[in-house]
Amino acid sequence: METCVIGVCDDDPEDVERICEELVRCIRHLGEKDPILCTCQSGKEMLEQCRNQKMRLVLLDLEMPGWSGFDLAGQLYAINPEIRLIFVSNHENMVFDSYEYAPLWFVRKSVMERDMLKAVQKYFQIAEKVQIHCKTREGMRDVWVYVNEVLYIECSGHTLYMKLTDQECHQFYGSLKPLEESFSSHGFIRTHKNYLVNARYVKEVGNRAILLEDGTELDIGKNRRKEILEMVETVQRGRRLC
């Protein structure tokens, strides 16, 4: 539904341009929409950009003045555990050192064209998407939704509100039932007749409401606390094991 924001951080401006061109070429090759690119030439600048906007993916040079790519990786995970990282380097001997930071892929600048395509393919394999057929003001249409960016879906009458992690809200028409069937295999649970919630973002299950990581409180169905708590724990446990 929204355009992917990808960060690119390298202290060499020519390498930044080369990485961006190759990245966009590979994304287009896979039939995906062009991303919004956020480019920086220092780790501190990239960290600040990631604090100000939600990025799904960041490509990092390993050797930079000040903070190295490894230093920045630790900082990025601290502010966004869901972020995905791809390391980019001329030094192939650093591949094994990078494993500690669980990168999605390692792109060698010497064979960037080949490695970048593999990295982008890997990213879109794990960036779960669900296709939904919905009615909007413009009529019926199919839209793709990135699962990890959906906090919850609220039903009010015949109107559905999809709340995203970046605080955006998309409105369409229908009922929760077909969405529940589409999203249930991706860790979403029906906590109330009016709410379908992404269990990965549930911070606390209270007696009458659940608290999400962004501070949102949502009512839960009567006498459903135990069942909801078990479902949330199951989903979050599976997520930690992945």
Image (cartoon, rainbow, N blue to C red):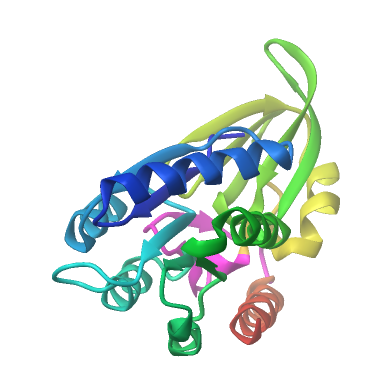
Point out the residue furthest to the front here. Answer: 110
Q: Quadrant of residue 121?
A: bottom right
Residue closest to the eye, 220 or 150: 150
Q: Is residue 60 left or right of residue 110?
A: left
Numbered-mark total: 0
Q: Is 108 within the magenta?
A: no
Q: Is residue 217 magenta?
A: yes
Q: Residue at x 48, y 79 (%)?
A: 92
Work out whether residue 77 can be spotted: yes
Residue 166 in view: no
Q: Percent from the top left, x then y, of residue 42?
A: 20, 58
What's the residue at 48%, 56% (across, down)? 57
Query: Looking at the rendering, in which quadrant would you find the N terminus?
Result: top right
Residue 93 versus residue 61 in the image, above or below:
below
Seen at 59% across and 50% down, the residue is: 152
Q: Camera-side residue: 3 or 189?
A: 3
Q: Tell me if 210 is positioned left or right of 42 in this view.
A: right
Q: Position of residue 242 (x, y in %)?
A: 66, 81
Residue positioned most to the left: 66
Q: Is residue 77 above or below residue 119?
A: below
Towards the viewer: 217 or 134:
134
Coordinates of residue 153 in the picture (x, y in percent): 63, 45
Which segment did they paint magenta? Answer: 199-223
Task: Give the residue displayed 45% in from the left and 64% down from the top.
Answer: 211
Q: Nearer the viewer, residue 43 or 56?
A: 43
Which of the 4 quarters of the picture holds residue 75?
bottom left
x and y percentages locating residue 137 in the rendered image: 67, 12
Classify 241 as above or below 49: below
